[in-house]
Image (cartoon, rainbow, N blue to C red):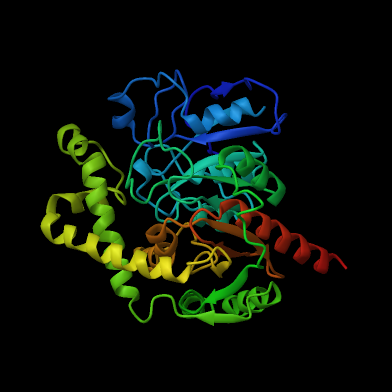
């Protein structure tokens, strides 16, 4: 499957008994495992760093819940990709749709789960690096609220957007991992009993329709059947502004996290990754800093939209069903622009987003996402499990 980093499989036994007894999991090679050097998908990063002295807290929590670590997985170089290719270590297999890329940058983790090598896997998600591979590989995927799960022991990329997420082949396993990793839910006394209101993100469905109108129609019908019978314009005609803001702030964050090392180590990046990091050489920091004010404005807009935890947005997870392995640079570029724009909703708001996988009669992935209010992670998981179970039951009759 080419899902795992080269060398002997990293394995760590559970440290206690708990709700994840018997479950095997893998960890993206941006997340520390004691005694193993976190390689970040780049051989020069690997060579210039030393073995982690401790597990990342998210790994510790899973081991203490009874799960067994069974491998570290390939990542796109230093997380700067949504495709799933790695020039140095190869491309993890999309086992269900081998003609297509697995999606990145948590490509190896998605591949390991999709192939059945492990029951679940940790990834990271900044601009879609769990959400995209979950959709492409037909998996359940969770990007939690920002700061819901500690980023200690995780190689930073763009920390104001970075999160630790995970993949599973079943909604029950996805939820079980969430029970271990997520903060405790509000008490019954403070939690609202009002039902969640599902609303479609009109621009995201329109983006899918520009690329694949038949799939967009299927996804719209599916969303309506799940309860999202109304729609709204989140971007209010300013998609280009949201994208420019995301890219500018991400570049600033990358420069702080990785810029000094890149300038001193002059690492070998693959041909598709090198131009992305080269943008740091021409970064106008003063101009880019001005976008932080725009970020605060857009975040405020989202805060208003999600002023109650009952609001849930639904949209296609990706603007295309798959990216073929021979996709042109133009096709990848369009995919990036649409994906980063769609994914900026959760990134800007620090919001949880869950990918739900569906397929249709032509055996291509169809994935819808649920986006909830910041901190509503557990309620969103409960809703996702309920919606998916009802859909599965209805389609089995």
Residue 325: x and y in percent read 47, 57
- Which corner quadrant of the image does residue 288 belong to? bottom left
Residue 229: x and y in percent read 63, 80
Residue 264: x and y in percent read 15, 33
The residue sitting at 46% across, 29% down in the picture is 56
Task: Tell me if residue 101 can be seen.
Answer: no
Q: Closest to the observer: 232 or 189?
A: 189
Quadrant assignment for the N terminus: top right
Is residue 293 shown left or right of residue 96?
left
Q: Closest to the observer: 79 or 31?
A: 31
The residue sitting at 46% across, 78% down in the picture is 203
- In this rendering, the answer to whether 309 lies above or below 173 is below
Is residue 337 shown left or right of residue 103?
left
The residue sitting at 13% across, 54% down in the picture is 285
Q: Residue furthest front?
A: 189
How many numbered tags mark residues here? 0
Quadrant assignment for the C terminus: bottom right
- Which corner quadrant of the image does residue 156 belong to? top left
Q: Closest to the observer: 365 or 180?
A: 180
Residue 31: x and y in percent read 44, 33
Q: Residue furthest right?
A: 397
The residue sitting at 59% across, 31% down in the picture is 62
Task: Tell me if residue 54 can be seen.
Answer: yes
Is residue 40 shown left or right of residue 166?
left
Q: Closest to the observer: 390 or 395?
A: 390
């Amino acid at each position: 499957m080419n899902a795992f980093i080269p060398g002997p499989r990293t394995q760590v036994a559970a440290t206690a008994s708990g709700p994840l007894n018997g479950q095997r999991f893998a960890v993206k090679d941006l997340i520390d495992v004691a005694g193993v050097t976190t390689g970040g998908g780049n051989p020069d990063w690997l060579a210039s760093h030393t073995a982690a002295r401790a597990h990342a807290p998210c790994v510790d929590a899973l081991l203490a819940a009874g799960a067994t670590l069974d491998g570290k997985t390939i990542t796109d170089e230093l997380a700067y990709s949504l495709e799933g290719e790695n020039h140095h270590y190869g491309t993890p297999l999309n086992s269900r749709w081998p003609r297509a890329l697995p999606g990145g940058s948590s490509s190896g983790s998605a591949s390991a789960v999709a192939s059945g090598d492990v029951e679940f896997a940790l990834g990271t998600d900044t601009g879609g690096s769990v959400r995209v591979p979950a959709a492409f590989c037909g998996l359940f995927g969770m990007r939690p609220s920002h700061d819901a799960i500690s980023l200690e022991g995780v190689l930073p990329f763009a920390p104001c957007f970075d999160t630790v997420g995970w993949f599973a082949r079943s909604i029950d396993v996805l939820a079980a991992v969430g029970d271990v990793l997520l903060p405790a839910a509000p008490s019954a006394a403070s939690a609202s009993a009002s039902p969640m209101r599902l609303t479609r993100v009109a621009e995201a469905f329109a983006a899918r329709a520009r690329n694949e109108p038949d799939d967009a129609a299927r996804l719209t019908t599916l969303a309506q059947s799940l309860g999202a019978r109304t729609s709204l314009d989140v971007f209010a005609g300013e998609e280009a502004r949201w994208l420019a803001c995301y890219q500018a702030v991400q570049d600033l964050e990358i420069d702080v996290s990785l810029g000094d090392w890149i300038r001193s180590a002059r690492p070998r990046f693959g041909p598709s990754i090198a131009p992305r990091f080269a943008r740091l050489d021409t970064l106008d920091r003063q101009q880019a800093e001005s976008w932080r004010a725009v970020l605060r404005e857009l975040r405020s807009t989202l805060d208003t939209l999600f002023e109650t935890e009952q609001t849930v947005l639904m949209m296609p997870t990706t603007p295309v069903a798959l990216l073929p392995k021979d996709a042109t640079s133009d096709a990848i570029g369009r995919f990036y622009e649409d994906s980063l724009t769609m994914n900026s909703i959760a990134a800007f708001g620090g919001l949880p987003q869950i990918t739900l996988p569906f397929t249709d009669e032509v055996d291509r992935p169809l994935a819808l996402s649920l986006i909830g209010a910041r901190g509503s992670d557990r309620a969103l998981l409960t809703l996702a499990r309920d919606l998916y179970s009802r859909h599965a039951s209805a389609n089995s009759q």
